[in-house]
Amino acid sequence: MACNGKVEVVMVMETKRNPSIWKHFDLCLMIDNYEMARCKGCGKFMKATNNSTLKKYFDRHCPVTKAKKMKRVKDPGPVLQMFSVFDVSRLFS
Ligand SMILES: [Zn+2]
């Protein structure tokens, strides 16, 4: 039952749409016979009509994507600091 304005998925459909975007989304047929895109990362539903909106959501707003990007990026700051300290101590030894 749809309640509290929540959406209900009838089925997940195959899509031939832009795979670079749609690999991150499921194309869902909803109870009222319209299509929605569901983010595979966080499960948020978006309108399935506009690929650029979906891409923007995935690139910039999805909390799951953001978390993954954070893990991938290594902060080189402390390493660089260690090297510079090492170099300076050699100068004075
Ligand atoms: Zn998401």
Image (tube, helix red, strand yellow):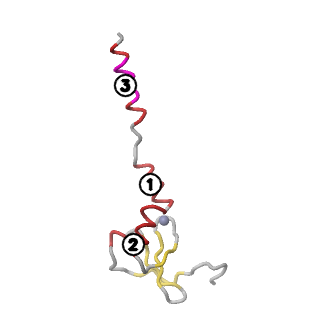
Specify the quadrant of the image occupied by residue 60: bottom left
Magenta span of residues: 81-88
Give me the C-alpha separation between circle 1 and circle 3.
30 Å
Question: Upstream in the sequence, badge 1 or badge 2?
Answer: 2
Give me the C-alpha separation between circle 1 and circle 2.
21 Å
Specify the quadrant of the image occupied by residue 17: bottom left
Can you give x and y, in whole percent of width and height, for residue 38 in the image?
48, 73
Which residue has dot 1 on it?
68
Which residue has dot 3 on it?
84
Q: Element under label 1?
A: helix
Toward the top, the furthest residue is: 93
Q: Element under label 3?
A: helix
Marks 1 & 2, CB-CB < 8 Å contact: no
Question: Upstream in the sequence, badge 1 or badge 3?
Answer: 1
Q: From what the image shows, is residue 46 above or below residue 33?
A: above
Give the main secondary structure of the magenta stretch: helix
Which residue has dot 2 on it?
52
Q: Of the residues tagged 1 and 3, which is closer to the observer?
A: 3
Identify residue type, mark 2.
Ser
Q: From what the image shows, is residue 43 above or below residue 1?
A: above
Marks 2 & 3, CB-CB < 8 Å contact: no
Can you give x and y, in whole percent of width and height, for residue 55 in the image?
40, 68
Q: Element under label 2?
A: helix
Identify residue type, mark 1.
Lys
Can you give x and y, in whole percent of width and height, for residue 53 in the image?
43, 72
Toward the right, the furthest residue is: 4
**Residue behind label 1 places its C-beta within 8 angstroms of ligand 1:** no
